[in-house]
Image (spheres, helix red, strand yellow):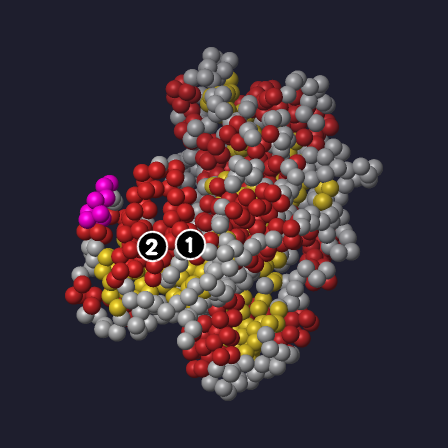
Amino acid sequence: MTMNVADRKARPAIDAKEYKGEVHPDWCPGCGDFGVLNCVQRALGELGIPQHEVAVISGIGCSSNLAGFINTYGMHTLHGRSLPNAQGFKIAHHDMTIVAVGGDGDGYGIGAGHLIHALRRNIDMTYIVMNNSIYGLTTGQTSPTSSFGMKTKSTPFGNPEAPLNPIALALGSGASFVARAFSGNPKQAVEIYKKAIMHKGFALIDTFSPCVTFNKVNSASFYRDNTYDMNAEGHDPSNLDAAFKIGMITPDGSQRIATGIFYINERSCYEETEKETLATPICDHKLGISAERAEKLKATFR
Amino acid sequence: MTSKNNIIVRIAGAAGDGIQSTGELLGKTISRMGLHVMAYNSFQSAIRGGHVWLQMSIGAEKQLDHGEEPEVVLLFNKTSPAVHVPDVKAGGAVFYNAGTIKKEEIESLRSDVNYYGLDFKAMTDAAGLKDVSPVMINVMLAGALVQTLHLDPKVTLEFIKHKFQKKGDDIVNLNHAIFNLGFEWTKANVKKIDVELKGNGKPKLFMSGNDALGMGLVAGGLKFYAAYPMSPATGILHYISTIAQSDKIVVKQVEDELAAINWVVGAGNAGVRAATATAGGGFCLMVEAQGLASMMEVPAVTVLVQRGGPSTGVPTKQEQADIALAMSGNGEFPKFVLAPKDMEDCFYQAARALNIAEKYQVPVIVMSDFFLSEHFETVDDLDFSKITIERGKFMTEWTSKEKYKRYAYTEDGISPRLRPGAPGAMYTVVSDEHNEYGHVMSDVEAGLPHAREGRIKMHSKRMKKIETMIVNGDAKPPTLEGEANAETTFVTWGSTYAYVQSAIKLLASEGIKVNHVNFTDIYPIPREKTLSVLKGCKRLISVEANMCNSLCHQILGETGFEISEHINRFDGEPFTGEYIVKEFKKLGSKKKQLVSV
């Protein structure tokens, strides 16, 4: 089983420029998503995973456009459906490295139902959510992670709902890798992305990726001023209780906001439960049923 | 006087009474003797309780119809007599569980049938049998049936052994003993029924439509199956799950139908043959992704098993009203919709769907219906050698020096598809409108002159595939069966096919000549060829299990030809030949004006 890079030997690094797509990103100048794109390209390059062995799979939204800006294989799918497409792709061609990307609306709103099951299912892939706490492409409505009371076009009198906490949600859903990054801290983000890609299982990285146009609250300077590296301050990612404790803190600036790896659990990934079927990627299996097998299949109905 | 070679049997009781077990014992006996059976299950959405019945039409010939009046009935519980005794053919045999049904009560219902109460407890006690569970009455009643129908008890005993051998010899022996009690009691007490069922001794396959659909997908090279359970499509998930490990197929029960179809699109794009199945409500959730598959040009097969709608509707009943749903989606996009007509066709069409999906890089929707998917029937054989795997313009390597264009403009609208993972040809499939490379043109370019031109060209390229399906002969016109110059032609699709065949036989015996046009390919419909079939008919009457004639609307929309006479049924029960004959006679002989082009 050639499962993902976790089983591979270290490879020579590839220049991050090799992952630059032909299409220049059309994000607003200053958008946090530029930083995430750069970090993904650097992480893949430093791990030396060739472009053709990677598929970047996204949903719909500003950040989901990332799939079109990177020189790998990819799927730019429907709003909220990056994870079903990505999981189907991965199971079909499991020796490729899969990075699903998208925004907080895509992953925590319309696609939240898929997220919790992807977390517990634990297929070997990486999911980066560019979280800007706003709906950008639809010009500024409240998102699942918008703060309570936040004024947006759809909540002119303040957001009446409490925000979703993706870290606690993931920890509670049986996640095997949970991290938080910030696009304004590329050094840390690249390291987290690399560990996530190397992790044998489903890795969620909630990544603050500020929207410069529609969210004046959760800005780059807000995160620069309020975040700290939890691992540098001693958080041990094998400690689930501590991860929950820090993860339960709403990142609204009322307390310091932790970034880094909350939790890693090296439990077996989904593919290991189907070892025989996946001994070679199913996309390489010979198609059809032998005459002998056909008779056996029919015999069960006689 | 020769004996009859066909008989109708009905078994009724509460869900959980073991009706399915009796049905299985009888069905296997019949199919292993080389006889034919068609078995219709009428049930509700309850795991225990409710009132369910199984009607089986048995004979040496292929059975087209489960029939109306049973000649032999087995009644398990108290609510059964009032429901079923009135239906029994005069002179028929009514077996009942004397432990739950009172003799006086049942016999007061009518006097022109013969009643046989089996007191299960008294009989097993008298025989000194130990560890008997009340549900084992289904084995005793099977014994009664096998004797009544003059079937070969050795075949049933052999199947009982096969079925229970994992549980040990004691259980096998106990079931054999109970079977023999029913068999011997019947021999001694029951008036002989004049029927002679002679099988050809060649065991047949006894399976459901869902089994046949699942087997067809597997024969066609299925490697990935994702689904969310929903009646009446769940049987496909069950069947493929049983052989997932042995045949190296990944089967995923996922969180919802949105997930199921999107997993299929993801897997299909990665280069495997992938499918899902659902009923109408689940398909509603899959509609957006049908457009996604078509826009991305990724093969995806969805089996849509229709049931009573709208909304949750009537989950365990028959209806054929989802053509508009199968056709739906936002915008205009190529797709293929087909509907198998019987058990064998389920097998071949499921495999064919996988070929069409890959050849044209489109979503294919296989429309089944509750009756077709859930009923059991004997099948002479399924010929795997007839199944070919055609992958169309599919590559796993890119050797050209030119840059690969995933959506290259081509004459036939089909762009060569390269499996992701090949070095030097990275591309992204996209849901937005795009250029030949798959670069999105909707965000910043839409509306600019080159993007307007691009939109026209790319949209036309995709839509060209519909014409190519017709030109290549993959989209087929309806078939015309039966007498060429018949005064009347019945028009059908899906499982109604068999009932109409049955009705045509009944009418022929009265000297009324009717022939039959059946649509397997629901979309695209090749206009000219279809019109020439329809225009050659004198009087067209559609037969559909719905109120609003969905096939006729489809034909009208695709060809401009209107069928204006209809036979409908939408009470949830499938047609029968007799029902169709009755409705046909109600229409009278006066032909309505046809609007044709």
Numbered-mark total: 2
Question: Is residue A27 shown in magenta?
Answer: no
As drawn, the label of residue A70 is: none
Q: Look at the magenta stretch and give its main secondary structure.
A: loop
The residue closer to the viewer here, B168 or B523, is B168
Image quadrant holding the C terminus of chain B, namely bottom right
Q: Which residue is mark 1?
A: B29
Mark 2 near mark 1, Cβ–Cβ under 8 Å? yes
The residue closer to the viewer here, B374 or A115, is B374
Residue B571 point in image, percent of width and height = 38, 67
Q: Is residue B79 visible?
A: no
From the viewer's perspective, is B29 left or right of B350? Answer: left
From the viewer's perspective, is B62 left or right of B477? Answer: left
**Is residue B526 placed above or below B263 in the rendered structure?**
below
The residue closer to the viewer here, B194 or A23, is B194
Callout 1: chain: B
Looking at this view, name the residue that lies furthest to the bottom: B590
Looking at this view, name the residue that lies furthest to the left: B104
**Is residue B223 placed above or below B152 in the rendered structure?**
above
Q: Which residues are magenta?
A: B124-131
Label 2 environment density (alpha carbons within 10 Å; few <14, some 14–19, many ≥20): many
Q: Secondary structure at mark 2?
A: helix
Identify which amino acid the numbered label 2 is placed on: Ala
Look at 40% across and 18% down and name the residue there.
Answer: A242
From the viewer's perspective, is B416 left or right of B522? Answer: right
Residue B17 point in image, percent of width and height = 29, 52
Q: Which residue is mark 2?
A: B142
The residue closer to the viewer here, B215 or A255, is B215
Residue B384 point in image, percent of width and height = 61, 50
**Is residue B285 placed above or below A96 in the rendered structure?**
below
Q: Is residue A14 visible?
A: yes
